[in-house]
Amino acid sequence: MKRIVWHGVKDVRLETDAEIPQCEAGGVLIKMEAFSVCGTDIKAYNAGNTRLTHPQTVGHEFAGRVEESKTPEFKKGERVVMAPTIGCGGCYYCGTGKRNLCASPRSIGFQIPGAMAEYMSLPSDAVTGGHLVRCPDDIPAPVAAIAEPLSCVINGLSRAPVDRMEHAVVIGLGAIGLLHSIALRNAGVKNIVTSDFPGHKADIARDLGFTVTLPEELEKNHKELSGGLGFELVVIAAPVRAVQEAAPSYARKGGYVSYFASLPPEHEKLSLSSRMIHYNELILYGTSDSTPGHVKEAVKLLSARSGDFAKMITVLPMEQWMEGYQGVMDMRYAKVVLTP
């Protein structure tokens, strides 16, 4: 079979002679329909990742069908997506339902061979732990493949009362920014402002009907753009320190600021106004990964708005994986989905 393998920094290869993995006891073998490129995959290509040891098949965002099952929980032919971080099941965080925060997790594409292959074998704890989620056939495969990043967005938005909000701003129009925008619209937020520089991604946002503003315009006009008071929710989907430091100033009193995008270790420290946070009663929060429950919610949303999500996706054959990586890095594509 074909698979995309990380061998080291700037050394990722398409290999065409790998053996199809065996289906483990209690596990399933999945035949891939589509898999998408995550920002984490690109970071690993450029700088490595402490969770990666080479060689490793990469990828954790996918849609596929059960090819073989050694568990009664799934049958051959069923279509699946998944929450790729497998919790240990025994720590405090797993016990409270927050498997995404597990103290000793294993992840698809890192400790376990990943999804960028024609076939992937999942171990029993990925199945019995509920991480594998059924997905209906009415969702096109490239759209179904982005269930995982959408589930992370749903996790982040679940931390704020978005169903009672009218004004939100999403800073950064990569895949995560666009996913946030669509999810906020689905939640009923009426005024969704997005902010980024001109280009393909901004064009997608306009095509989807969102207000697009330049970063300097947001800084200058954020109150006018939000009904005069500032935004009830500020979503940071841009890994830029200056952006993350400025973001709380765009929130109205009592507002929420979601630090969805992380910064690299060498730039992780922020300078924030404690007086602004204190006197404006702001709620700043982070979010990471998702649970199987969030994936189930993502599948429902993909089914309801598959046309919107399709507009942000560029589909390429897996042989053009490097074009996909480079296109995201060059900001020519918002979200790349590869097909085997």
Image (cartoon, rainbow, N blue to C red):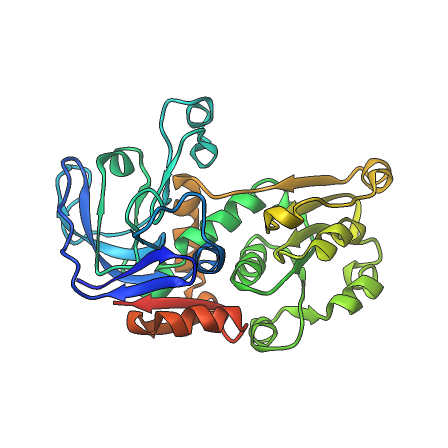
Q: Is residue 138 at least partly visible in the picture?
A: no
In the rendered image, the quadrant that contains the N terminus is bottom left
Up/down of 108 relative to 101, above or below: below
Depth check, front residue: 61 or 74? 61
Percent x, y of residue 91: 42, 23
Horizontal placement of 122 versus 102: left or right?
left
Horizontal placement of 219 versus 268: left or right?
right
Depth check, front residue: 4 or 63? 4
Percent x, y of residue 42: 46, 60
Depth check, front residue: 232 or 204? 204
Residue that appears at 30% across and 51% down: 56
Residue that appears at 30% across and 58% down: 5
Depth check, front residue: 228 or 245? 245
The quarter of the displayed image where residue 161 is located: top right
Up/down of 97 relative to 197, above or below: above
Up/down of 316 relative to 151, above or below: below
Number of callouts in the render?
A: 0
Percent x, y of residue 309: 46, 65
In the rendered image, the quadrant that contains the C terminus is bottom left
Q: Is residue 271 at least partly visible in the picture?
A: yes
Residue that appears at 30% across and 52% down: 55
Residue that appears at 63% across and 58% down: 238
Percent x, y of residue 287: 57, 42
